[in-house]
Amino acid sequence: MTAPSPIVEFKSVTKSYGDGPLVLDGIDFTAESGEFISLIGPSGCGKSTLLRLIADLSPISSGSLNIAGNTPESKATELAFVFQEPTLLPWQTVANNVELPQKLRHVSPPERATSRDRALQLVHLSDRGDAYPRQLSGGQKMRVSIARSLTLDPKILLLDEPFGALDEMTREHLNEELLEIREQQGWTAFFVTHSVAEAVFLSDRIVIMSANPGKIAHEVVVDLPRPRTSDTRLSRPYQNLVAQVSDLLRSVEESKS
Amino acid sequence: MRRALTTILLPAATGAAMIAIWYAIRHGLSEDFKFLLPTPGEIIESLDDNWSILGRAVFNTSQGALLGFGLAILVSSLLALFMSLSSLVRIALYPYLMILQMTPIIIFAPILILWVGPGLQSVVIITFLICFFPLVVNTTQGLISADRNLVELFKMYRASRWQEIRLLRIPSALPYFFTGLRIAAVLAPIGALVGDYTAGSSAGNGGGLGFQAIIYSSQAKYPALFATAAVTCILGFVFVAVVLCMSWFALHKWHDSYQRTDT
């Protein structure tokens, strides 16, 4: 094991859109390489904005944001973003959708096929490569979306409420699958969610945010042993953590109103 | 199966009823006025008698319609791509597209004859003008309506502008493009007919359906005039059928408008 090193570092970051009010204020935060971090908080707390800043989809307004390996001149670290919606090209097959990021980088077809097959295998969809998105269930579409994000071997995976639209059973199942894939790949994850249970199950650390403007209110370290399975959800420490995070979240939401 | 039978039998029954009414009206007309409404039988007979002339007219009109339609597809697609690049371009151009659409062809035709002379070239330009607007408006709308999340995805993966247009914007625009194409396919034969009527010429290859309609009406050959109308309808149907087939091939695998309910 190498010593953990920071991969994402926020220093007094603020963010506002145009002349609008502050969306994020005084964000100081460091993520170690390989950490699984969940962001949770009331709506409007800027947790999705935080992801967009890391993804460089939007610039920070002040402060500094360092991402390992990236200098202002070169954005070298591979980032992958999994949206709330599966966001697939409906006119392409599952296989072509998964190949898209590499196709955009002009990777050769044989190399693309190898990454695509491996990614589809990870999400248990090897036999659906020829299907079109509309032929898949909601959970399957989300799996394709995750497979696509894995093809570039990302160092950082940003997930914006990826399972929010799915039913409880599918969601729990996909949580377990996501952790299995992580065991094999070891990316750093930022996971936005509204579900405390999901956040506790997945994370090494939970960041609880408050709104108006978005600030980091609390951080909770989740020291449950890994690998985590469906049995983890039955354990006492898990349930205690869910209760603790729920209380903190409630206090944040109450202090707001 | 029952559904298929219904979709064939029901329109056939409507058609039979309309022909029956047709004959009834004709039967009610006094002998002096029967020429006003030829029977379907007379129209088909006249079609047979005049086929050498009408066949050539159909060919000429189809040629004008196809060339004008094709030109409209090409130019509207290129202009739509250009307009999709920036809202400023759209704001700058849109009023003039509207004016182009509002200019009455009937008034424009004599000017066109003055500029390029009567005949095929005028017919092509008039067809082009009639087809152009629905195509450019729909295609532009399609190009700028790509899913916002997909646009961000492409941005995230640092896709080039050209990759974004080719792999995202153009496929997203296809359903809109085909909507425009369907409207334009109905308009193209009518456009060619109007073009031929207002700016056609018998010079060279002998004029099209519009030109022929003028001749038949001046000769009071009413069954032949009805036959000309029938042939124009059929030509329109062919245009629409071809476009519907193209649309099916391009979209049926993925687009919701072709979604089967059994999956």
Image (spheres, coloured by chain):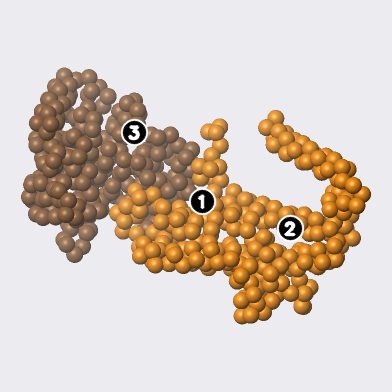
Chain colours: A brown, B orange
Q: What element carries label 3?
A: loop
Residue type beneath disc 3: Ala
Q: What element carries label 1?
A: helix
Please report contact status of discs 3 and 1: CB closer than 8 Å, yes or no. no
Disc on res. A165 = 3
Q: Mark 1 lies on which chain?
A: B
- Separation of residues labelled 3 and 2 (CA atoms): 52 Å
Disc on res. A91 = none
In x, y percent, where is residue A119?
Answer: 36, 44
In x, y percent, where is residue B241?
Answer: 67, 52
Rendered position, A95 above or below B211: above
- Separation of residues labelled 3 and 1 (CA atoms): 27 Å
Q: Name the residue under label 2.
A: B232
Name which quarter of the figure residue A166 lies in: top left
Q: Which chain carries label 3?
A: A
Rendered position, B130 above or below B233: below
Q: In this view, does A175 lie to the left or right of B70?
A: left
Q: Mark 1 points at which residue?
A: B175
